Amino acid sequence: MDNSGLRGPVRGSRRPASGSIPGMTAPALSPLASLLDLLFPRTCGGCGAGPPGSGGWCPWCAESTAGPWSVGVPGAGRVAVAGRYRGPLRRAVLAYKERGRRDLAADLAGLLVAPLAVVLPVAAGRAPPRIRLVPVPSRPAAARARGGDHVLRLCRALEPRLAAAGLPASTAPLLALDRRARDSVGLDGAARAANLAAALYPAGRGRAGRGRRPPPDPGAPVVLVDDVVTTGATLRACRRALRGLGCEPVGSVLLADATTPGRKQ
């Protein structure tokens, strides 16, 4: 697949590439969506600017994101993000994830199109295969508190954005977290890895191993999707779990990079 129209020149870890997507336009709002936007106006999730109803991600915040960025995460393969976890992007991610701004899903999903083009392998002259988007799972309790799995919702919002860019995709929730998994906030890399090793398993089967879900179509590129990369432990654990299902992810895309500046994670 030739991604030359989507891929910007990535110069290395944490270096910005071109974020423009030639030919990429936002999907038109349906009449119902337009009516809802009129009745329940939104403000920008990054800066709170209006005017009300102008959308969840204003041009100024889009300009400040400056992605995609390629991030070096040992053991995680290709990793690309929309930007650093700070400023408007951090505020928008928190608003979407923790403060009920589910309306931001489509705007944030749009930020993942360019990072996804960075991690996809190039195959010139071939029709683009259907991409399998695998969301990094949330803890069941956290998903309930947030009104659903926020990364799964992000993947589904990403599908039409990729289709508009000529990249057919479908969401494949192949992984799950046991209800006993700890909240990863405040855990270092080693503690996160131990937590996930005990709690991460293939979706569609119990911990005893019955009812295993078959892997995606052979040859279809598998891409992990998450919100923020911090230590890389989650990405590494998910890659190992997918390999156990016979899948080899081509890379991971995330909204934001929160790895420690100046230190590889």
Image (spheres, rainbow, N blue to C red):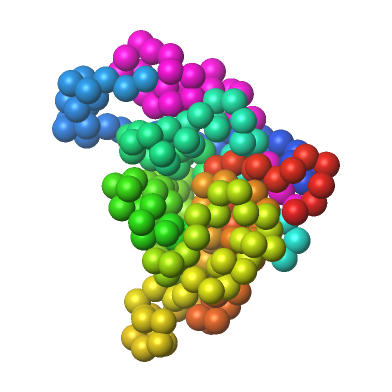
Query: Image point 80% across, 51% down: which residue?
Result: 264
Q: Is residue 191 left or right of residue 111?
A: right
Q: Position of residue 115 (x, y in %)?
A: 59, 46
Dominant SS of magenta comes to loop
Stretch in magenta: 44-72
- Compared with 120, 217 (above or below) is below
The answer to whether one can see residue 68 in this image is no
Q: Position of residue 155 (x, y in %)?
A: 41, 52
The answer to whether one can see residue 82 in this image is yes
Q: Position of residue 232 (x, y in %)?
A: 66, 57
Query: Image point 65% across, 42% down: which residue?
Result: 258
Choose between 24 and 147: the one closer to the eye: 147
Total numbered labels: 0
Q: Position of residue 200 (x, y in %)?
A: 50, 71
**Image quadrant in which you'd find residue 99:** top left
Q: Quadrant of the N terminus?
A: bottom right
**Image quadrant in which you'd find residue 85:** top right
Choose between 221 and 238: the one closer to the eye: 238
Choose between 122 and 55: the one closer to the eye: 55
Q: Per the image, is 46 magenta?
A: yes
Q: Quadrant of the C terminus?
A: bottom right
Query: Image point 64% across, 49% down: which residue?
Result: 230
Query: Image point 61% across, 61% down: which residue?
Result: 192
Q: Going by the picture, which residue comes out furthest to the top?
A: 51
Q: Is residue 261 left or right of residue 90?
A: right
